[in-house]
Image (spheres, rainbow, N blue to C red):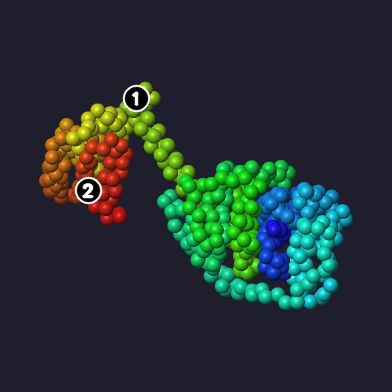
Amino acid sequence: MNIGLLISELEDIDVKNICIGACQAAKNKEINLFILPGRYLYTDKSVNEDRPYDYQNSALFDYAMTTDFDALIIDIERIGKNAPILKKEAFLRKFEPVPVLTLTECEGFTNVNPVQSDHDQMQQLGYESVCDAIYFAKNKELPPSESQKQFNFVECSPAAAIEELANISSSLLHRKYASEKAYQTFAEDARKAGVKNCGIMLYDKKVRNTIKYSWERPEVISIKSALINGTITELKDDEVRIGTDMIISSFTKAGHNIFIMGDIFVGEYQLGLLIIEFKPVMLTDNFFECLLSVITGVSRVSYLEKELKRTNEELYEVQEELARDDSVLDHIGDQDYLTGGLNRRGFFAKAYDYLKEQFKPGSSAIVAYIHMESLKKINEMYGHEEGDRAVKRVAKILEEVFEGSIYGRIRGDEFAVIDITEDEGKGETFRQEMSTQNAILLSETSRYINHLQYSICEFGHEENLSLREMLKETDENLQRIKGNY
């Protein structure tokens, strides 16, 4: 049996005690209990200016509108404390035809049996409400009052709660997610903390939700990570889509348990949902809210990593198209104004065509990066006119060393070269010649050092090997030579 407990916030001491009692009853009766802390019913006037998006939490209540629940217990007194009576009544009615029990009297609705004892009154109320809901779901009437003499809840110390939150946060926030799976990491951390069941689910796209224009719950949601009975479920393509009305049933197949749910949102937009096995630590003030905030942050970082990767790929494609499309950029030209050779655009335009025409099976591509590491100091100490002379001198050297190759000045102090050859050892010949010319260059002037750092890499023919990949590897090798890696 599945019972939903709709409450305001876990920081309310009475709500904590209601949850303690309800959890005890769920264990004793061996049923599934789902706690939904959706805060309050908001109006324009009741929104806290310091926390303008708290109203987003109430979207969580919409997940109780499913026949997966056999009955709902609603703390309408606290949830609707800032709402008019008509709004509270409308809120309660939207869950029909699921049986609804209120914790306090509300005209037109069935409320749970009043607590007969003053001992642990709110805990008794939580316990009694679950017992009543189970009986009411089966018999459509309230049972005789049933109380619990003792509650075995063990409170978690604030220090232990902070430590657990810190461990999860550190694990999730101190890593890059281009290659590491954020949501899978959370499932692993939850398992280490003793959680056997949890899941993170996100919508295909963010859904706008405001007080004036409330959202419509999407029909489907994607499971990003799932921990079931202590086992992390491998999801095909890291994504399994299910109906949003099937979320509750998907977590109840493994036997009775207690879960807490929270919605993931940013600003005016709903992103998804967290459902996780309930632990005593979650009744520590602000623990669950902070946990949701960490997951939200990781979700955004993971999303931005993917967007950055996608944008970079698109940018490279645009650069390649621009480099080839002379009709668009004719007015810019492909000649470097200073050296008379190719500029960045000219180099890439010719290099792409050269690679396409000449890079065949049996041939090798030799790619070089040359960096004038002292150009900045020459400009600072002797002026840009002297710096220009140094650049021209380097360009002349490259013309001699890489005669017949395509080369160009791709940045102020960097040159790139590509050569396609079938001759073995040509790359080594380039290296030896560059070493000789570098020594000559160093000896030419006593006023300053004009020194080159360079990387020359060779690539055998591969059908899918691109110029961008070869340049990237050559540049990374140059950075290692320079000590940046």
Residue occupying image coordinates x 39% and y 34%: 317
Q: What residue type is labelled 1?
A: Asp
Q: What residue type is labelled 2?
A: Gln
Residue beneath label 1, please? 326
Label 1, secondary structure: give it. helix
The residue lying toward the viewer, choosing from 233 and 273, is 233
Residue 91 in view (yes/no): no
The location of residue 143, given as percent across then percent down, is 82, 64
Residue 474 in view (yes/no): yes
Label 2, secondary structure: give it. strand
Classed neighbour count for the residue bearing mark 1: other residues with Cα under 10 Å, few (<14), some (14–19), many (≥20): some
- Quadrant for the C terminus in the image: bottom left
Residue beneath label 2, please? 453
Residue at the farthest front position: 139
Residue occupying image coordinates x 75% and y 77%: 149
The location of residue 85, given as percent across then percent down, is 84, 53
408 vs 185, left or right, is: left
The location of residue 474, given as percent across then percent down, is 26, 45
